Amino acid sequence: MKYVIIGAGAAGVRAAETLRSVDADGSITLVSGEPGPPYARMAIPYILSGRIDEEGAHQRREANHFDLLKIRYLNNKALAVHAGPDGGTVDLDDGSRLEYDRLLVATGSSPSLPPVAGTDTPGVVACWTLEDARVIAGKLKPGARVVMVGAGFVAGVCMKSLVESGVKLSIIAGRAGQILRSMMTPVGSSMLQRWLESKGVNVITKGRTERIEPGPRLVMDNQTLDADLIILATGVHPNLSFLEGVGAEVNEGIVIDDRMRTSVPCIYAAGDVAQGRDFSTGEWVVHALQPTATEHGRVAALNMAGRDVPYRGSLSMNVLDTVGLNSYTLGLWKGQEGGEVAELVDEAHYHYTRLCFHGDVLVGAIIIGAPNAVGAIRGLIQTRRNLGRWKDELLKNPHRVVDAFVDLNE
């Protein structure tokens, strides 16, 4: 059996290793679109802060890790995929062609740049790759003026390293007017914004970015910001262009079934590029989360190797360290129609707890500043445990969620 995996992020690496564990003789080729060994994208903030060097971001420490597993590792970009009923080929940017019986697409995402002029101006960079990290690190000096366009999860991941370096950071929330809107209620966003401002961050929630000029300079409709560095953190989109013409169904990402197969039988997909099952809703969505990517890769590999392993779905869960204030969103944190919500807000201590119920089941939560309850909350959501008498108790006092978890599991 010939296996080809395009993409060497969390999904691709786990898939390659899983394939070798269940198929000792198959040919496995892992293709990375970036130079160097596979690295963890979520480690970039730790590189910027100086906590680790680039080698510390490598997914596997041994230089010969893939050689020992007899996995062929290539640094090439996939240009096109061709598929027949029982396999196909992948065209690479060096002119070579790989044959496969089973193909896994695990190409992840790329930054979505804002629709304004000047995004290619010197001193303007995304915060996504190791090369981006090198550019940013070279500018992180005390007093340097850094403007970050975007205030979602990608921006949130990078904020701590920037603030700790001593730069003067401004964050543009954009038309939404709310930071971290995709993972937080207005109550939680307001609390995190106050926290950032207490750390000296200039959070701009009004105005529209019009263009970027040399300098670099960010021009808005209500003000102009001169900078030493502008970071674009306005979201991401799946890397799919090389699949044009192959026949795979694409919506928000590549549409897959519960065995990680695409609509082309010999092609599978995993990670940020795949539109997989959501544990909470049963719907098919893109969860750009590292734990999801890793599990996607494992399950996809098992099915590629002939095992019949269904994927139960991924739990939407975001964990963010916002300059020292931790926040967590799990499951259906917005709540569910016909359900109930309990909230406790402690503005003085930056604590926020929101529990969302549907019937007697906990279906979602937001936690800011109180991480000791997160494990219990995740356990109750994923097991869909009937809360019984604890439902009314938690509606009155959400802080007792750990007591509920312990009692229900005795």
Image: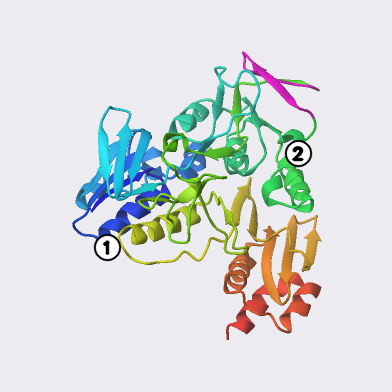
Asked if residue 51 shows in the view, the reply is no
Asked if residue 135 shows in the view, the reply is yes
Between 13 and 49, the residue placed more toward the observer is 13
* Element under disc 1: helix
- Amino acid at circle 2: Ala
- Amino acid at circle 1: Val
**In-image side of 385 versus 295 (left or right):** right
**Location of residue 296 in the rendering, given as x and y in whole percent from the top left corner:** 44, 56
Extent of the magenta region: 207-221
Residue 389 lies in quadrant: bottom right
* Element under disc 2: helix
Relative to 14, residue 153 above or below: above
Dominant secondary structure of the residues highlighted in magenta in the image: strand
**In-image side of 314 versus 97 (left or right):** right
Relative to 82, residue 214 above or below: above
Q: Which residue is mark 1?
A: 22
Relative to 281, residue 15 above or below: above
Relative to 386, residue 44 above or below: above
**Location of residue 408 in the rendering, given as x and y in whole percent from the top left corner:** 62, 83
Q: Which residue is mark 2?
A: 176
